[in-house]
Amino acid sequence: MKLTINGRELNGKPGQTVLQVARENDIFIPTLCDYPGLPPHGSCRLCVVEVAGRSNTPTACTTLAEDGMAIETDTPQVRELRSELLRMLLAEHPTACLFCPEGLLCQESMVTLRKTGVTTGCRTCPADKQCELQEMVERSGLQGVAYPVRYRALRVEKEDPFFDRDYNLCVLCGRCIRVCESLHFTNIPTYVQRGDETRVGTSFGQTHLAAGCSFCGACVDACPTGALWEKARKWDNKPVDGPLSTCPFCSLGCELRLLTTKSGDAIIGSQPAEVGGMLCVKGRFGLTEVLNHPARLKGVLSIDQGHSMRSDWEGAVSHVADKLANCSANDFALVVSASCSNEELYVADKFAREVMGTTPILGAAARYGAGLGAVSRLLAVSKPLDVMEQADLIFCLGLDASYAQSVVEPYLKRAKARGAELITLNATEHVPGRFASIWLRPAAGKEQEMLEELIQGRADGPVGEVGRLLSSTNGALLLVGPDFLSRMPDAIERLHAASGADLVAIPAEGNLGGALRLGLGAASNSVTPQVLYLVGAPIPEALAGDTFILYQNTHAPSDTPQDGILLPMAAFGETEGSLLDQSGVQKHFTAAVVPAGESLPGWEIICRIARAMGKPGFNFTSAAEIASEMAGAPARLIRDVELPTWLKAPGEHGFLGSELSQWVAGLGALESAQREEKQGVLAD
């Protein structure tokens, strides 16, 4: 169909709104309540337009385009109406940042506008120059507000982790409420009070933590003003959109966009790759704190009898090469983290085998034990999350989906809404249990017994009913969380074989799939080594004090070894690489900034040591070169071997050998709340 906007004849598609047609053709129409992925709302009224033949001024976001329609978006009447609407909005909004005759001069002379933690006042709003309301005022040319200004004087809510809420800056656009309802199928924020006392809040005035918020940050991304703002970025300048990358914190491999400072010297934020996309709390808020934590290891440190001394790369590499040259294979061990990139894993594996003549140890092997082979086989057939869109029955096994895997929750709720059967097996309170059709709830520690009953088909009651549903439903899917995958992979494998269902397995580690594809597991030599090379792995507590530690990581260890060298490794966002997600799809991550301090990519550190030892085959200059060689390497099978007694098992929310809560303060609050809830349930 054809329609005319501002005298231009344009093409439109059936079902499009006037606003959508205008935006497709670069015609600006102001909005505050409109947001990608949400249905039209029309509450802010700023997108009013004139339509030939109509006496009123409808909103462009709710008006369907029609063939032959003639629309004007910028007439004097429309501009005056929008200005009046803005004046009414601003009657309850601080205006110091909007109307100032010295504003331009002030901007030119100030280096930074955020020197103190004031939440209102001249140029101290955290959304300064990132505020859509500010942009609307500048475009309208509005010079002031004719109405009496009513400051709400609401308390700034700072009790929750990750973001503050200053509803004095709220314009009641409802975007935070609607994005939570429409895209995430929950309702943490809502309208409270009535009339001119209406504001955004939570039911019964609870904190977001108490209300069950997963802290995905979707509401913060949707807010057009400074009402919702993340704590870690509250007084940063406006960020620059950096490259797209892949979140490394779990095996889902969610795509995200890195945000950097204008100078490009630091990563100060992350957002979903697409507006309206999804990240969990770790990817949305944790990344910035991890990368900029004071514990970042930025220089080479030599440790002698527990005392650290600064060193340089040349001296450190030479010392390490001499140490390893006099070390036999039986006296050496290399432990590598499943959080490392494919390229780092490959070079570490090659170094252990070709330079030191031993088998590298995967740190995650301590978590999975003898079940590592079963986990490898399960990941080989694991499918991506979007298979849930077609499943007729989804059986959740040990999946919490509250914080770390909160991106799974919308998939489950969409499946439930279209009529899929949702079943869950878990001993404690968890997200799928709130809306599942059947919740199999064994006593804590008895989960595997219930699984065995299900596999053998000898159960009655709800367990027997689930067994019958699994066997009779063609589109059945097993959705396995990190807990069950680590504790009972053999039982999961047998249930998968018996049911014939599809499988989505979600291990905790970001690149466990890549590590297992390389055949990394545990070494048969369990003797305490004289030299232990830790690549992204923690220092074991059970080691003898005379073990020489080569600690290669992004952050300094919690406990300094007695003897060794600390080698600073470049972090995610500072180096290139790839990983395999839980469905075996290769995902890439990109360098947005240069490595912190003197740190180097993990693979480059290992290559420098190998070259210093005179070993060939380690002349890589980029991750792409390593990937090219790795593509021709044969796949290896995981062998069941003895675990070293000193190997330390990583936690479910670990990254490069440490718990993320060690670096991200807010995660500690979430884990404590979750732990208290489960302990309370078990006590009852």
Image (cartoon, grey):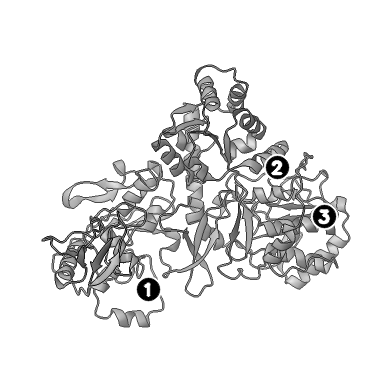
Q: Percent from the top left, x then y, of residue 496?
A: 62, 32
Q: Circle 2: is it few (<14), some (14-19), or many (20+) Cα within 10 Å?
A: many
Mark 1 or 2 closer to N-term?
Answer: 1
| Residue type beneath disc 2 | Ala
Q: CA distance from mark 1 to mark 2?
A: 50 Å
- Dot label at residue 113: 1
Q: Residue at point 36% right, 82% down?
A: 108
Tag 2's secondary structure? helix
Upstream in the sequence, badge 1 or badge 3?
1
Residue that sits furthest to the left in the current view? 55
Type of amino acid at the residue the image marks with label 1: Leu
Mark 3 residue crowding within 10 angstroms, few (<14) / some (14–19) / many (20+)? some
Please identify the quarter of the rendering in which residue 64 is found. Answer: bottom left
Number of numbered labels in the structure image:
3
Figure quadrant of the N terminus: bottom left
With 200 as the anchor, is 511 left or right in this view?
right
Of the numbered discs in the image, which one, if any, rests on residue 366? 2
Residue at numbered disc 3? 353
x 28%, y 71%: residue: 97
